[in-house]
Amino acid sequence: MGACEFNFDGLVGPTHNYAGLSYGNMAATSHAMQIANPREGALQGLEKMRRLMSMGVAQGILPPQERPHIPTLRRLGFEGPEKTILEEAYKISPELVRNVSSASAMWTANAATITPAADSRDGRMHITPANLVAMFHRSIEHPVTGRVLKAIFPEGAHFAHHPAMPGAPQMGDEGAANHNRFCDDYGAEGLHMFVYGARAFSRENAPKRFPARQTLEASQAIARQHGVKNAVFIQQNPEAIDAGAFHNDVVAVSNKQVFFYHEQAFADPDAMEAHVRAAAPYIPFRFIRVPARDVSLDDAVKSYLFNSQLLSIPGREKMTLILPMEVAETASTKRYVEQLLETDGPIGHAETLDVRQSMRNGGGPACLRLRVVLNQAAQQALGARVILDDELIDELRLWVEKHYRDRLSPNDLQDPDLLVECRTALDALTNMLNLGSVYDFQR
Protein backbone atom coordinates (compact mmCIF):
# COMPACT_ATOMS: atom_id res chain seq x y z
CA MET A 1 0.00 0.00 0.00
CA GLY A 2 1.50 3.32 -1.08
CA ALA A 3 2.66 5.92 1.42
CA CYS A 4 2.80 9.70 1.20
CA GLU A 5 4.77 12.23 3.21
CA PHE A 6 2.57 14.98 4.64
CA ASN A 7 3.90 18.29 5.86
CA PHE A 8 1.90 19.24 8.96
CA ASP A 9 2.42 22.97 9.39
CA GLY A 10 1.85 24.77 12.65
CA LEU A 11 -0.67 27.58 12.55
CA VAL A 12 0.80 30.81 13.91
CA GLY A 13 -0.99 31.65 17.17
CA PRO A 14 -2.91 34.81 18.14
CA THR A 15 -0.23 35.78 20.69
CA HIS A 16 2.65 35.73 18.19
CA ASN A 17 5.11 38.27 19.57
CA TYR A 18 8.80 39.08 19.83
CA ALA A 19 9.77 38.64 23.47
CA GLY A 20 13.27 37.29 22.72
CA LEU A 21 12.79 34.23 24.93
CA SER A 22 15.00 31.72 23.12
CA TYR A 23 18.59 31.93 24.35
CA GLY A 24 20.91 30.72 21.61
CA ASN A 25 18.48 31.71 18.84
CA MET A 26 20.16 34.75 17.33
CA ALA A 27 17.14 35.96 15.35
CA ALA A 28 14.81 35.75 18.34
CA THR A 29 17.10 37.69 20.67
CA SER A 30 18.02 40.32 18.07
CA HIS A 31 14.33 41.19 17.47
CA ALA A 32 13.32 41.19 21.13
CA MET A 33 10.60 43.67 22.16
CA GLN A 34 9.75 44.70 18.61
CA ILE A 35 6.15 44.91 17.39
CA ALA A 36 4.76 41.74 15.83
CA ASN A 37 1.80 41.23 13.52
CA PRO A 38 0.03 37.98 14.46
CA ARG A 39 -2.48 38.29 11.64
CA GLU A 40 0.22 38.73 9.03
CA GLY A 41 2.23 35.85 10.52
CA ALA A 42 -0.72 33.46 10.36
CA LEU A 43 -1.63 34.54 6.83
CA GLN A 44 1.99 34.14 5.69
CA GLY A 45 1.92 30.60 7.08
CA LEU A 46 -1.33 29.80 5.32
CA GLU A 47 0.01 31.23 2.07
CA LYS A 48 3.07 28.98 2.40
CA MET A 49 0.78 25.97 2.86
CA ARG A 50 -1.38 26.98 -0.11
CA ARG A 51 1.66 27.43 -2.32
CA LEU A 52 3.10 24.02 -1.47
CA MET A 53 -0.30 22.38 -1.85
CA SER A 54 -0.59 23.89 -5.33
CA MET A 55 2.74 22.23 -6.16
CA GLY A 56 1.35 18.83 -5.20
CA VAL A 57 2.71 18.61 -1.63
CA ALA A 58 0.36 16.88 0.82
CA GLN A 59 -0.38 19.37 3.61
CA GLY A 60 -1.81 19.05 7.08
CA ILE A 61 -2.18 21.56 9.89
CA LEU A 62 -1.62 21.64 13.64
CA PRO A 63 -3.42 24.21 15.82
CA PRO A 64 -1.71 26.75 18.08
CA GLN A 65 -1.53 26.40 21.86
CA GLU A 66 -3.78 28.14 24.37
CA ARG A 67 -1.95 31.33 25.38
CA PRO A 68 -1.59 33.03 27.77
CA HIS A 69 -1.58 29.80 29.77
CA ILE A 70 -3.38 30.56 33.02
CA PRO A 71 -3.02 26.98 34.39
CA THR A 72 0.76 27.46 34.50
CA LEU A 73 0.34 30.68 36.48
CA ARG A 74 -1.99 28.88 38.90
CA ARG A 75 0.64 26.16 39.36
CA LEU A 76 3.08 28.91 40.28
CA GLY A 77 0.85 30.13 43.09
CA PHE A 78 -1.28 32.86 41.54
CA GLU A 79 -4.89 32.73 42.69
CA GLY A 80 -8.24 34.34 41.99
CA PRO A 81 -10.11 35.30 38.82
CA GLU A 82 -8.13 34.90 35.63
CA LYS A 83 -8.06 38.66 34.95
CA THR A 84 -6.60 39.24 38.42
CA ILE A 85 -4.06 36.46 37.96
CA LEU A 86 -2.81 37.95 34.70
CA GLU A 87 -2.56 41.46 36.14
CA GLU A 88 -0.80 40.31 39.32
CA ALA A 89 1.63 38.09 37.45
CA TYR A 90 2.54 40.90 35.07
CA LYS A 91 3.06 43.30 37.96
CA ILE A 92 5.43 40.87 39.68
CA SER A 93 7.17 39.47 36.59
CA PRO A 94 6.45 40.69 33.04
CA GLU A 95 8.98 38.10 31.84
CA LEU A 96 6.89 35.28 33.31
CA VAL A 97 3.76 36.47 31.50
CA ARG A 98 5.74 36.67 28.27
CA ASN A 99 6.86 33.08 28.75
CA VAL A 100 3.34 31.74 29.34
CA SER A 101 2.11 33.74 26.32
CA SER A 102 4.62 32.50 23.76
CA ALA A 103 3.29 31.34 20.39
CA SER A 104 6.37 29.20 19.73
CA ALA A 105 4.31 26.04 19.21
CA MET A 106 3.91 27.28 15.62
CA TRP A 107 7.35 25.71 15.00
CA THR A 108 6.04 22.18 14.77
CA ALA A 109 9.42 20.72 13.83
CA ASN A 110 9.79 20.78 17.62
CA ALA A 111 6.40 19.26 18.35
CA ALA A 112 7.38 15.60 18.31
CA THR A 113 9.51 12.82 16.89
CA ILE A 114 7.70 10.61 14.38
CA THR A 115 8.64 7.08 13.33
CA PRO A 116 6.75 5.92 10.22
CA ALA A 117 5.10 2.49 10.26
CA ALA A 118 7.65 1.11 7.78
CA ASP A 119 10.47 1.73 10.26
CA SER A 120 8.97 0.40 13.50
CA ARG A 121 9.05 -3.18 14.68
CA ASP A 122 5.29 -3.36 15.29
CA GLY A 123 4.32 -1.75 11.97
CA ARG A 124 2.63 1.28 13.56
CA MET A 125 3.54 4.96 13.41
CA HIS A 126 5.06 6.01 16.74
CA ILE A 127 4.85 9.51 18.23
CA THR A 128 6.64 11.14 21.17
CA PRO A 129 5.95 14.81 21.92
CA ALA A 130 9.13 16.75 22.70
CA ASN A 131 9.67 17.88 26.29
CA LEU A 132 11.51 21.07 25.19
CA VAL A 133 13.00 21.48 28.66
CA ALA A 134 15.79 23.80 27.49
CA MET A 135 13.38 26.77 27.42
CA PHE A 136 10.66 27.33 30.03
CA HIS A 137 8.22 28.87 27.56
CA ARG A 138 8.35 25.73 25.43
CA SER A 139 8.54 23.18 28.24
CA ILE A 140 4.85 23.77 29.03
CA GLU A 141 3.72 22.77 25.52
CA HIS A 142 3.93 18.98 25.46
CA PRO A 143 0.77 18.05 27.45
CA VAL A 144 -1.48 19.84 24.95
CA THR A 145 0.71 18.81 22.00
CA GLY A 146 0.19 15.20 23.09
CA ARG A 147 -3.60 15.66 23.27
CA VAL A 148 -3.70 17.26 19.83
CA LEU A 149 -1.61 14.50 18.28
CA LYS A 150 -3.78 11.82 19.89
CA ALA A 151 -6.91 13.51 18.54
CA ILE A 152 -5.45 13.56 15.03
CA PHE A 153 -3.73 10.15 15.13
CA PRO A 154 -5.95 7.94 17.35
CA GLU A 155 -4.15 5.28 19.38
CA GLY A 156 -4.77 1.82 17.96
CA ALA A 157 -3.97 -0.29 14.94
CA HIS A 158 -2.12 2.46 13.06
CA PHE A 159 -0.73 4.87 15.67
CA ALA A 160 1.12 4.50 18.99
CA HIS A 161 1.73 7.37 21.42
CA HIS A 162 4.39 7.73 24.08
CA PRO A 163 4.80 10.29 26.87
CA ALA A 164 7.42 13.00 26.58
CA MET A 165 10.87 12.27 27.96
CA PRO A 166 11.35 13.03 31.69
CA GLY A 167 11.49 16.78 32.26
CA ALA A 168 15.16 17.32 33.02
CA PRO A 169 17.99 18.80 30.91
CA GLN A 170 19.72 15.42 30.89
CA MET A 171 16.79 14.13 28.82
CA GLY A 172 16.37 17.26 26.72
CA ASP A 173 14.42 16.50 23.55
CA GLU A 174 13.61 19.02 20.81
CA GLY A 175 11.72 16.72 18.47
CA ALA A 176 12.13 16.46 14.72
CA ALA A 177 14.36 19.56 14.51
CA ASN A 178 17.23 17.23 15.44
CA HIS A 179 16.09 14.22 13.45
CA ASN A 180 16.45 13.11 9.84
CA ARG A 181 14.96 10.14 8.04
CA PHE A 182 16.61 8.72 4.92
CA CYS A 183 14.87 6.33 2.53
CA ASP A 184 14.71 5.34 -1.10
CA ASP A 185 10.95 5.89 -1.06
CA TYR A 186 8.68 7.24 1.68
CA GLY A 187 6.92 3.90 2.13
CA ALA A 188 10.15 1.87 2.20
CA GLU A 189 12.16 1.07 5.33
CA GLY A 190 14.40 3.98 6.22
CA LEU A 191 17.36 5.01 8.34
CA HIS A 192 16.82 7.42 11.23
CA MET A 193 19.56 9.90 12.08
CA PHE A 194 19.22 11.35 15.56
CA VAL A 195 21.45 14.41 16.02
CA TYR A 196 22.40 15.38 19.55
CA GLY A 197 24.26 18.32 21.04
CA ALA A 198 25.83 16.68 24.08
CA ARG A 199 25.76 13.65 26.34
CA ALA A 200 23.49 13.82 29.36
CA PHE A 201 26.11 13.18 32.01
CA SER A 202 29.26 14.62 30.47
CA ARG A 203 30.48 18.07 29.47
CA GLU A 204 33.08 16.64 27.11
CA ASN A 205 32.78 18.07 23.58
CA ALA A 206 29.79 20.20 24.65
CA PRO A 207 29.20 23.73 23.31
CA LYS A 208 30.67 26.49 25.44
CA ARG A 209 28.48 29.50 24.60
CA PHE A 210 24.92 28.21 24.17
CA PRO A 211 23.11 25.18 25.61
CA ALA A 212 22.96 21.85 23.81
CA ARG A 213 19.22 21.27 23.78
CA GLN A 214 19.21 17.64 22.60
CA THR A 215 20.99 14.85 24.46
CA LEU A 216 22.22 11.54 23.15
CA GLU A 217 20.40 9.68 25.89
CA ALA A 218 17.02 11.23 25.04
CA SER A 219 17.50 10.34 21.38
CA GLN A 220 18.41 6.76 22.24
CA ALA A 221 15.38 6.44 24.52
CA ILE A 222 13.00 7.63 21.80
CA ALA A 223 14.50 5.20 19.29
CA ARG A 224 14.01 2.36 21.80
CA GLN A 225 10.41 3.15 22.68
CA HIS A 226 9.50 3.61 19.01
CA GLY A 227 11.05 0.27 18.11
CA VAL A 228 13.12 1.90 15.37
CA LYS A 229 14.67 -0.84 13.27
CA ASN A 230 17.66 1.17 12.00
CA ALA A 231 19.10 4.28 13.62
CA VAL A 232 22.37 6.19 13.93
CA PHE A 233 23.27 8.81 16.52
CA ILE A 234 25.48 11.67 15.37
CA GLN A 235 26.76 14.61 17.41
CA GLN A 236 26.24 18.11 16.08
CA ASN A 237 29.39 20.22 15.91
CA PRO A 238 29.54 22.22 19.19
CA GLU A 239 30.91 25.16 17.18
CA ALA A 240 27.73 25.21 15.12
CA ILE A 241 25.58 25.41 18.27
CA ASP A 242 27.75 28.22 19.61
CA ALA A 243 27.34 30.04 16.27
CA GLY A 244 23.55 30.03 16.69
CA ALA A 245 22.55 26.65 15.19
CA PHE A 246 20.47 25.79 18.24
CA HIS A 247 18.83 22.92 16.31
CA ASN A 248 20.42 20.75 13.67
CA ASP A 249 17.81 21.85 11.13
CA VAL A 250 19.52 25.26 11.07
CA VAL A 251 22.55 23.65 9.38
CA ALA A 252 21.16 20.52 7.67
CA VAL A 253 18.07 19.25 5.85
CA SER A 254 17.29 15.87 4.28
CA ASN A 255 14.78 14.32 1.91
CA LYS A 256 14.73 10.66 0.88
CA GLN A 257 18.34 9.81 0.00
CA VAL A 258 19.65 13.40 -0.14
CA PHE A 259 21.42 15.18 2.74
CA PHE A 260 22.08 18.90 2.23
CA TYR A 261 24.26 20.27 5.00
CA HIS A 262 26.94 22.77 5.98
CA GLU A 263 30.42 21.33 6.32
CA GLN A 264 30.64 22.65 9.89
CA ALA A 265 27.33 21.06 10.94
CA PHE A 266 29.28 18.01 12.15
CA ALA A 267 32.76 17.88 13.64
CA ASP A 268 33.89 15.18 11.18
CA PRO A 269 31.67 15.18 8.07
CA ASP A 270 33.67 12.41 6.35
CA ALA A 271 33.15 10.10 9.31
CA MET A 272 29.45 11.03 9.45
CA GLU A 273 28.91 10.17 5.79
CA ALA A 274 30.81 6.88 6.10
CA HIS A 275 28.82 5.91 9.19
CA VAL A 276 25.49 6.67 7.51
CA ARG A 277 26.38 4.76 4.32
CA ALA A 278 27.49 1.74 6.31
CA ALA A 279 24.29 1.75 8.39
CA ALA A 280 22.01 1.60 5.34
CA PRO A 281 23.80 0.24 2.25
CA TYR A 282 20.39 -0.26 0.61
CA ILE A 283 19.88 3.53 0.32
CA PRO A 284 21.66 5.34 -2.57
CA PHE A 285 22.78 8.36 -0.53
CA ARG A 286 23.54 11.73 -2.13
CA PHE A 287 25.43 14.10 0.15
CA ILE A 288 25.65 17.80 -0.67
CA ARG A 289 28.21 19.38 1.66
CA VAL A 290 28.31 23.18 1.47
CA PRO A 291 31.84 24.48 2.07
CA ALA A 292 32.44 27.27 4.56
CA ARG A 293 34.48 29.07 1.92
CA ASP A 294 31.27 29.45 -0.11
CA VAL A 295 28.81 30.05 2.75
CA SER A 296 30.12 30.94 6.18
CA LEU A 297 28.50 29.42 9.23
CA ASP A 298 27.33 32.90 10.22
CA ASP A 299 25.66 33.42 6.82
CA ALA A 300 24.05 29.99 7.04
CA VAL A 301 22.53 30.87 10.41
CA LYS A 302 21.54 34.40 9.36
CA SER A 303 19.86 33.37 6.11
CA TYR A 304 18.44 30.00 7.25
CA LEU A 305 19.61 28.40 4.01
CA PHE A 306 19.38 24.95 5.62
CA ASN A 307 16.12 25.62 7.42
CA SER A 308 14.53 25.30 4.02
CA GLN A 309 12.21 22.49 3.04
CA LEU A 310 13.71 19.95 0.67
CA LEU A 311 10.85 18.34 -1.22
CA SER A 312 10.08 15.84 -3.96
CA ILE A 313 7.50 17.63 -6.12
CA PRO A 314 5.24 15.50 -8.34
CA GLY A 315 6.23 15.88 -11.98
CA ARG A 316 9.73 17.17 -11.21
CA GLU A 317 12.69 14.85 -11.68
CA LYS A 318 14.86 16.82 -9.28
CA MET A 319 14.11 17.99 -5.75
CA THR A 320 13.01 21.48 -4.79
CA LEU A 321 14.25 23.79 -2.03
CA ILE A 322 11.63 25.99 -0.34
CA LEU A 323 13.68 28.94 0.90
CA PRO A 324 12.99 31.99 3.06
CA MET A 325 13.45 35.34 1.33
CA GLU A 326 16.49 36.00 3.49
CA VAL A 327 18.47 33.48 1.41
CA ALA A 328 18.03 35.67 -1.69
CA GLU A 329 18.98 38.75 0.35
CA THR A 330 22.28 37.27 1.59
CA ALA A 331 24.97 37.47 -1.08
CA SER A 332 26.77 34.22 -0.32
CA THR A 333 23.65 32.05 -0.06
CA LYS A 334 22.04 33.63 -3.12
CA ARG A 335 25.17 32.89 -5.14
CA TYR A 336 25.47 29.35 -3.79
CA VAL A 337 21.86 28.42 -4.60
CA GLU A 338 22.21 29.80 -8.14
CA GLN A 339 25.32 27.68 -8.66
CA LEU A 340 23.72 24.62 -7.05
CA LEU A 341 20.80 24.68 -9.46
CA GLU A 342 23.21 24.69 -12.41
CA THR A 343 24.95 21.49 -11.34
CA ASP A 344 23.97 17.95 -12.25
CA GLY A 345 23.01 17.19 -8.66
CA PRO A 346 19.72 16.00 -7.17
CA ILE A 347 18.42 19.51 -6.35
CA GLY A 348 17.19 21.33 -9.42
CA HIS A 349 14.59 23.86 -8.29
CA ALA A 350 14.20 26.58 -5.67
CA GLU A 351 11.15 28.53 -4.52
CA THR A 352 11.33 31.58 -2.25
CA LEU A 353 8.58 32.35 0.25
CA ASP A 354 7.91 35.22 2.63
CA VAL A 355 7.76 33.98 6.22
CA ARG A 356 9.33 37.06 7.80
CA GLN A 357 7.04 37.13 10.82
CA SER A 358 8.37 33.68 11.70
CA MET A 359 11.96 34.40 10.65
CA ARG A 360 12.24 37.36 13.03
CA ASN A 361 11.71 34.91 15.85
CA GLY A 362 14.20 32.42 14.39
CA GLY A 363 11.87 30.04 12.54
CA GLY A 364 12.24 29.34 8.83
CA PRO A 365 10.15 27.17 6.48
CA ALA A 366 11.43 23.90 7.95
CA CYS A 367 10.69 25.01 11.53
CA LEU A 368 7.04 25.47 10.61
CA ARG A 369 6.38 21.87 9.59
CA LEU A 370 6.38 18.34 10.99
CA ARG A 371 6.92 15.58 8.42
CA VAL A 372 4.54 12.63 8.75
CA VAL A 373 4.53 9.58 6.45
CA LEU A 374 1.09 7.98 6.17
CA ASN A 375 -0.03 5.00 4.14
CA GLN A 376 -3.55 4.91 2.74
CA ALA A 377 -5.02 2.97 5.66
CA ALA A 378 -3.50 5.41 8.16
CA GLN A 379 -4.84 8.38 6.22
CA GLN A 380 -8.35 6.90 6.48
CA ALA A 381 -7.89 6.42 10.24
CA LEU A 382 -7.19 10.11 11.00
CA GLY A 383 -9.44 11.48 13.71
CA ALA A 384 -9.73 15.15 12.77
CA ARG A 385 -10.21 17.47 9.81
CA VAL A 386 -6.58 18.52 9.44
CA ILE A 387 -5.67 17.59 5.85
CA LEU A 388 -5.71 20.80 3.88
CA ASP A 389 -7.65 21.58 0.75
CA ASP A 390 -8.64 24.93 -0.75
CA GLU A 391 -11.91 25.00 1.18
CA LEU A 392 -10.24 24.53 4.56
CA ILE A 393 -7.51 27.06 3.81
CA ASP A 394 -10.18 29.61 2.85
CA GLU A 395 -12.01 28.92 6.12
CA LEU A 396 -8.80 29.29 8.10
CA ARG A 397 -7.98 32.56 6.38
CA LEU A 398 -11.38 34.00 7.30
CA TRP A 399 -10.91 32.71 10.85
CA VAL A 400 -7.54 34.49 11.16
CA GLU A 401 -8.90 37.73 9.73
CA LYS A 402 -11.77 37.64 12.22
CA HIS A 403 -9.85 36.77 15.40
CA TYR A 404 -6.25 38.00 15.10
CA ARG A 405 -4.77 41.37 15.94
CA ASP A 406 -2.51 43.10 13.44
CA ARG A 407 -0.23 44.55 16.10
CA LEU A 408 1.12 43.00 19.29
CA SER A 409 4.01 43.99 21.52
CA PRO A 410 5.30 41.92 24.46
CA ASN A 411 3.78 44.52 26.79
CA ASP A 412 0.32 43.89 25.29
CA LEU A 413 0.32 40.36 26.72
CA GLN A 414 -1.01 41.64 30.05
CA ASP A 415 -4.28 42.66 28.38
CA PRO A 416 -7.06 40.38 29.73
CA ASP A 417 -9.05 41.02 26.54
CA LEU A 418 -6.34 39.15 24.64
CA LEU A 419 -7.00 36.04 26.73
CA VAL A 420 -10.71 36.19 25.86
CA GLU A 421 -9.95 36.77 22.18
CA CYS A 422 -7.59 33.79 22.05
CA ARG A 423 -10.01 31.40 23.72
CA THR A 424 -12.86 32.52 21.49
CA ALA A 425 -10.66 31.90 18.46
CA LEU A 426 -9.50 28.46 19.64
CA ASP A 427 -13.05 27.35 20.43
CA ALA A 428 -14.02 28.17 16.86
CA LEU A 429 -10.91 26.46 15.51
CA THR A 430 -11.41 23.17 17.36
CA ASN A 431 -14.97 23.05 16.01
CA MET A 432 -13.72 23.72 12.49
CA LEU A 433 -11.07 20.99 12.72
CA ASN A 434 -13.22 18.47 14.65
CA LEU A 435 -10.51 18.21 17.30
CA GLY A 436 -12.67 17.96 20.38
CA SER A 437 -11.72 19.50 23.74
CA VAL A 438 -7.92 19.55 23.59
CA TYR A 439 -7.28 22.81 25.47
CA ASP A 440 -7.25 23.21 29.23
CA PHE A 441 -9.94 25.91 29.19
CA GLN A 442 -12.27 23.51 27.32
CA ARG A 443 -11.93 20.65 29.82
Image (spheres, grey):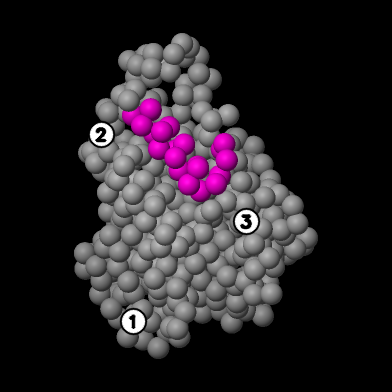
User: Quick check: is 420 in the magenta stretch?
Assistant: yes
**Which residue is at the far right?**
122
Mark closest to the chain's N terminus, 1 or 2: 1
Label 1 to label 3: alpha-carbon separation:
38 Å
Q: Looking at the image, is mark 3 or mark 2 nearer the viewer?
A: 3
Mark 1 is on which residue type? Leu
Q: What residue do we see at 30% from left, 64% from top?
A: 353
For label 3, the residue is: 382
User: Is residue 368 positioned above or below 258 on the image?
Assistant: above
| Residue 201 % position (x, y) | 62, 41
Name the side, left or right, on which 49 lies relative to 186.
Answer: left
For label 2, the residue is: 409
Mark closest to the chain's N terminus, 3 or 2: 3
Q: Mark 2 and mark 3 in contact (Cβ < 8 Å)?
A: no
- Quarter of the image with the N terminus is bottom right
Q: Can residue 232 be spotted in the picture?
A: no
User: Is residue 74 positioned above or below 104 on the image?
Assistant: above
User: Is residue 290 positioned above or below 38 on the image?
Assistant: below
Name the side, left or right, on which 112 lies relative to 330.
Answer: right
Name the side, left or right, on which 45 lies relative to 133.
Answer: left
Q: Residues within 10 Å of mark 2 (few under 14, many from 20)?
A: some
Q: What residue do we see at 28% from left, 60% from top?
A: 354
Q: What residue do we see at 44% from left, 40% from top?
A: 428
Name the side, left or right, on which 136 lies relative to 293.
Answer: right
User: Quick check: is 359 in the magenta stretch?
Assistant: no
Q: Relative to the observer, which residue lies in front, 110 or 266?
A: 110
Q: Which mark is residue 341?
A: 1
| Residue 123 % position (x, y) | 75, 63
Q: Which residues are magenta?
A: 418-438
Label 1 to label 2: alpha-carbon separation:
40 Å
